[in-house]
């Protein structure tokens, strides 16, 4: 019913990594899709507040393709290789009639969005990342003890997922019991700047998506990720994160600015790890260049001087 209210329909698209469940709709006639990718322990529903806020501003997001990534929501696992997943996401957009796309991802979904843009630079017109998981998060997945000194809450989640996986079939009834007595709602508090102001339905949805096997598979896949591939990205990349994000290392933004030629990072003072849930309107505004982008980006430049000229041309064209 939530999808229908937002003008979206459920579609299942066959891909090389298996069937992917999608909520799609609000077509405007544009050839550019708005692909939305959730993070680990999430589903397409993480974007409901942002879509609703865009309607309230009378600037509705259109041509939405909101995926349930493999292993979460209504899409079965296993969690695929990142390169295969990027190809599958492009295949979903094309199957729905979109030859190009802007792509926005939250947390793990932000990393996947960048991978799609790197693999398909001509088709990707812009990238938005919300509280993206960077090198700091991957350090925790490799070494939860030492890496956890910088991001202790993320390290705690990794250990919790390992324990739940070890419990096997007993983990599901345990999680249902913890949710029923409100423990999972309490454990989600560090993810938000103002947890008491977050709708209980949001934390209940997060609790439903606690899937240890999928989470740990994604963590393993991320350990060997080569961020250097993002140098191939030819479009603008805009990032937004909360000051109180317990899952994002401060140095990640500096490293990403070094890798990507047209990168900008915005920080919201009153958000945690879910900026698009706690502050959907400021998040929409921080990503306004992403929503407005609809042109084919230039080919990736081969040297720093050419990259600088290309970035200036793009900004000049955008103003004209």
Image (cartoon, grey):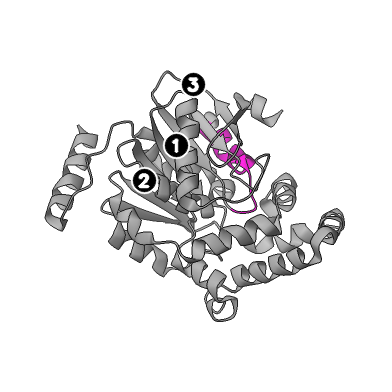
Quick check: can you spot residue 245? no
Check the image and report above or below for 77 versus 138. above
Q: Residues within 10 Å of mark 3 (few under 14, many from 20)?
A: some
Q: Badge 3 is on which residue?
A: 27
Q: Badge 1 is on which residue?
A: 90
Q: Is residue 101 left or right of residue 137?
A: left
Q: Is residue 120 left or right of residue 86?
A: left
Residue 309 spot, x, y in % from top left: 13, 48
Image quadrant holding the C terminus, namely top left
Region of the chain picked out in magenta, as a range: 40-54
Q: Is residue 52 magenta?
A: yes
**Alpha-carbon distance for marks 1 and 2?**
10 Å
Residue 139 spot, x, y in % from top left: 50, 72
Q: Residues within 10 Å of mark 2 (few under 14, many from 20)?
A: some
Name, please, the residue furthest toward the front.
16
Give the mark nearest the N terminus, 3 or 1: 3
Q: Is residue 218 magenta?
A: no
Q: Badge 2 is on which residue?
A: 119
Give the mark nearest the N terminus, 2 or 3: 3
- For image coordinates 30% across by 43% down, the residue present is 235
**Alpha-carbon distance for marks 3 and 1?**
18 Å
Numbered disc 1: secondary structure: helix
- For image coordinates 75% across by 57% down, the residue present is 185
Q: Is residue 157 left or right of residue 286?
A: right
Q: Are marks 3 and 1 in contact (CB under 8 Å)?
A: no
In this view, the residue in front, 300 or 36, is 300
Image quadrant holding the N terminus, namely top right
């Amino acid at each position: 019913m939530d999808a229908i209210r937002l003008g979206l329909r459920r579609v299942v698209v066959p891909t090389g990594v298996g069937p992917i469940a999608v909520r799609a709709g609000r077509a405007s006639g544009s050839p550019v899709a708005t692909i939305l990718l959730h993070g680990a322990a999430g589903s397409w529903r993480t974007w409901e507040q942002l879509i609703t806020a865009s309607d309230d501003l009378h600037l509705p997001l259109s041509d939405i393709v909101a995926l349930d990534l493999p292993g979460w929501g209504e899409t079965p696992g296993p969690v695929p290789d990142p390169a295969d997943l990027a190809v599958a996401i492009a295949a979903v957009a094309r199957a729905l009639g979109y030859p190009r796309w802007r792509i926005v991802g939250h947390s793990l979904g932000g990393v996947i969005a960048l991978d799609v843009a790197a693999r398909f630079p001509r088709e990707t017109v812009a990238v938005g990342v919300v509280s993206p998981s960077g090198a700091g998060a991957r350090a925790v997945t490799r070494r939860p003890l030492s890496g956890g000194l910088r991001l202790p809450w993320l390290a705690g989640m990794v250990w919790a997922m390992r324990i739940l996986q070890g419990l096997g079939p007993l983990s599901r009834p345990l999680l249902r019991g913890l949710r029923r007595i409100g423990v999972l709602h309490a454990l989600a508090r560090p993810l938000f700047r103002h947890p008491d102001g977050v709708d209980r339905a949001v934390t209940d949805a997060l609790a439903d998506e606690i899937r240890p096997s999928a989470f740990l598979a994604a963590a393993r896949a991320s350990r060997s990720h080569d961020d250097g591939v993002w140098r191939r990205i030819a479009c603008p990349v805009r990032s937004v994160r909360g000051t109180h994000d317990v899952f994002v290392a401060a140095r990640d933004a500096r490293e990403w600015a070094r890798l990507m030629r047209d990168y900008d990072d915005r920080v919201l003072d009153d958000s945690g790890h879910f900026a698009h849930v706690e502050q959907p309107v400021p998040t929409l505004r921080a990503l306004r260049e992403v929503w407005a982008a609809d042109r084919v980006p230039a080919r990736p430049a081969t040297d720093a001087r050419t990259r600088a000229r290309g970035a200036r041309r793009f900004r000049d064209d955008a103003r004209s």
